[in-house]
Image (cartoon, rainbow, N blue to C red):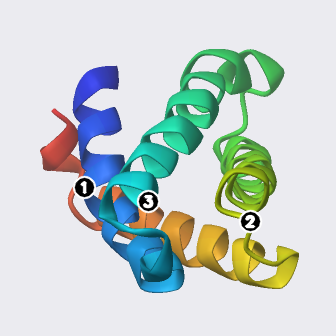
């Protein structure tokens, strides 16, 4: 199930990232999206559940971690401003959360 989530997350988030960083080129944006999700998603899937048993707390911790860690990665790799990195990370994670929440069967 993790790999389905990883593929779905990238399918949703990388095109959104491209909207924020298209000047960097498709390959660099694609690689950066894979890197950001490759570092944040395992933490969300395998470590965050150990932190709390409350679903609401899990969502808050996991999404906050994902947004903040991905903001830093986008900033450092793509050399875009913190504001643009944060906005991109917020948009990316909001959309992937909504897709996963609205269509949970995609992850089964």
Q: Find disc 3 in the rendering and name its residue.
A: 29
Residue 52 position by quadrant: top right
39 lies above or below 84: above
Quarter of the image with the N terminus is: top left
Other-residue count near label 1 (Cα within 10 Å), few / some / many at <14 / 14–19 / ≥20: some
Of residues 102 and 30, the one drawn nearer to the viewer in this rendering: 30
Q: Residue at x 44, y 54 (%)?
A: 28
Q: Find disc 1 in the rendering and name its residue.
A: 11
Give the secondary structure at mark 1: helix
Query: Could you tell me if the residues under marks 2 and 3 are in contact, i.e. CB atoms within 8 Å?
Result: no
* Residue 36 position within the rendered picture, expressed as x and y whole percent measured from the top left: 58, 43
* Residue 69 position within the rendered picture, expressed as x and y whole percent measured from the top left: 77, 46
Q: Earlier in the sequence, mark 2 or mark 3?
A: 3
Q: State whether residue 73 appears in this view.
A: yes
The disc placed on residue 79 is 2
Query: Could you tell me if the residues under marks 1 and 2 are in contact, i.e. CB atoms within 8 Å?
Result: no
């Amino acid at each position: 199930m993790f790999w389905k989530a990883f593929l779905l997350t990238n399918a949703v988030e990388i095109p959104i990232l491209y909207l924020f960083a298209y000047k960097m080129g498709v390959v660099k944006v694609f690689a950066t999206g894979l890197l950001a999700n490759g570092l944040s998603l395992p933490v969300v899937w395998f470590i965050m559940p150990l932190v709390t048993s409350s679903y609401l707390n899990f969502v808050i911790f996991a999404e906050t971690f994902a947004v903040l860690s991905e903001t830093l990665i986008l900033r450092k790799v793509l050399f875009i401003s913190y504001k643009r990195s944060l906005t991109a990370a917020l948009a990316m994670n909001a959309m992937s959360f909504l897709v996963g929440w609205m269509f949970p069967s995609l992850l089964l």
